Image (cartoon, rainbow, N blue to C red):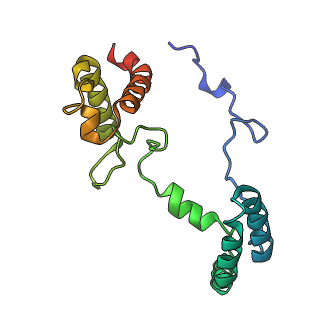
Amino acid sequence: MGRYQDVSRIRRPGPTSPLHISRMTLLNYPVPELDVTLQEVSRVLQLTLRPDLYPEFKNTLEQQRALLQQAQEQVATRALGKENWVTEQFKRSLLSCYDPLPTSTALPVVLLPPKAKGCTQLGRAAALLWAAAKLYSEPKLLEGNECSLWTYWGIPALVGQFLLDRLLTSTTSWLR
């Protein structure tokens, strides 16, 4: 007999509860106006570009103005009647990613993005753990200049050592 013998007495989260899951609705923002966007881009780039590069940017912008206007019109046309002008792109790009392992926080040397369709998250995680265990058990792989593992990967030894230290501090608890 468990802690809750009568499941009907368990409180379910209501609509005001932070645990309540409801359909998320996105606000319907208008497609940004091209002139306003370009003014903001120009303002930021004027502050960040070297003074000799900013006129080149302005010149290129004026040359590409018609193309940018055409792209703006295409975005506005596609956004008509949609829930939100970025929803389709969000669903197509982010939500269609079948691999939940974030490659942005992984070491690209050890955990390459999957190129084969059959590559699964479990397979990638196993490869990462194997690589960490191999480097942990055979530190000689990191020594030397010509036969070093880092040289094989085209990484300078000091950078490789830094990457290994970071990798081992986050994965040694799995190895014990």
The residue lying toward the viewer, choosing from 27 and 130, is 130
Instruction: Locate residue 99 relative to residue 39 in the image: left or right.
Output: left
Residue 59 in percent (x, y) is at 68, 78
Q: In this view, does 144 lie to the left or right of 174?
A: left
Residue positioned 66% across, 66% down in the render: 53
**Residue that appears at 69% across and 65% down:** 52
Residue 139 appears in view: yes
Establish if 47 lies above or below 156: below
Q: Which residue is rendered at x = 79% and y = 39% of the image?
A: 16
Q: Identify the residue at horizontal 27%, vertical 25% (top origin).
A: 142
Q: Which residue lies furthest to the front in this view?
A: 52
Q: In this view, does 120 lie above or below 160?
A: below
Residue 11 locus on image (x, y percent): 69, 28
**Which is nearer the eye, 171 or 50?**
50
Q: Splitting the image into 4 quarters, where does residue 121 fall?
A: top left
With 127 as the anchor, is 92 left or right in this view? Answer: right
x, y (%) of residue 54?
71, 67
The one nearer the camera, 88 or 133, is 133
The vertical placement of 130 against 92, above or below, is above
Whether residue 30 is visible to the viewer of this picture, yes or no, is no
Q: Closer to the camera, 146 or 100?
A: 146
Q: If the image is split into quadrants, where does the C terminus sit?
A: top left
x then y, percent, for residue 55: 71, 72
- Relative to 106, is 84 on the left or the right? right
